[in-house]
Amino acid sequence: MTARFTLGIHQEPICLPDTYRSSLVVYSGYQTLRVAGEAGIARVTIDNPPVNVLDVALMTDLRDLLTALRDDRSVRVIVFDSADPEFFIAHVDMTSTPDALAGLAATAPEGVNVFQAVGEMLRRQPQVTIVKLAGKARGGGAEFVAAADMAFAAIGRAGLGQIEALMGIVPGGGGTQYLAARVGRNRALEAVLGAELFDAELAERYGWINRALPADELDAFVDRIARDIAALPEGVIVAAKQAIVPDDLSAGLVRENDAWAGLVFRPVAGHLISGGLAAGAQTRDGERDLETLMRNLAG
């Protein structure tokens, strides 16, 4: 018997003997992702320095990888982590322009924008998707975390925040809908309008993530649960995901896009976004306390 692991849309599949199923195999072909396979698990490391912004390259790689893995029956679990100990996905690239996004927009499913398309692909992935959050995830990064099936975060290191309000906009990549589904309307409004960075323990208490764990236990815990799920008898994962389906958020995503689009091209949003970049957003120093940086602009 062999274990088949699909590499990506630009590569041919590799067949590995069962004796190698437990070995860590690294695949190339993605600009911003490192992918390794192990006994039914795809381990995806986001590596898009300096701070892992969700830019065109990363969104393209995520789309291509999730598409490649979708029909690969040898992969049962996908674990996402970051090569950067401080940042998982910082947020959407603040320098993105409509022209730069045009290619992704042309391939986005009907009814969603390019940012929502990432989250919707993740929510509907047949494999179990797990985020191992050891650093910060704001904006589009926080939306990615909420779109995954499960998320586990490191106490004292992880942070989640919907910072868009401080840029004069609202979340536009599914965040309003994913948060409301996870934590309820009142707490979603708090996260969106309060625009604060939630630590792991508060995020767990609100239901934004599954569990907050001591930082030195996060790796072992995620490894164990991923391996336990991947080792389940044939058909169990499929049946569970058929029974516990993602909510239909199609109408809400349209409302969200309309709300976001009504704000993002206003002069105030442009002023705050360009001011944030000038003040250090998307640099390591600026991103460590982006909320204060952006609030100082508004003040």
Image (cartoon, grey):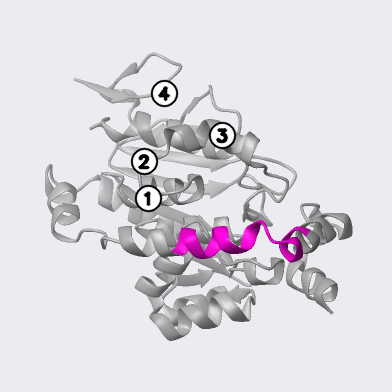
> Is residue 282 left or right of 93 when viewed as pictured?
right
Quick one: label 4 or label 3, which is nearer the N terminus?
4
Q: Which tag is nearer the camera, tag 3 or tag 1?
A: 3
Q: Which tag is nearer the camera, tag 4 or tag 3?
A: 3
Q: Which residues are magenta?
A: 256-270
Asked if the residue under mark 1 is in contact with the one under mark 2, i.e. CB atoms within 8 Å, the reply is: yes
Q: Circle 4 sits on which residue?
A: 7
Q: Circle 2 sits on which residue?
A: 109
Picture coordinates of residue 39, whole percent (x, y): 32, 36
Quick one: label 2 or label 3, which is nearer the N terminus?
3
Residue 164 at least partly seen: yes
Query: What SS does tag 2 mark?
Result: loop
Quick one: label 4 or label 1, which is nearer the N terminus?
4
Q: Residue at x 45, y 51 (%)?
A: 116
Q: Residue at x 43, y 33 (%)?
A: 107
Q: Main secondary structure of the magenta part?
A: helix
Q: Which tag is nearer the camera, tag 2 or tag 1?
A: 2
Q: Circle 1 sits on which residue?
A: 120
Up the image or down, 26 lies above or below 63; here it is above
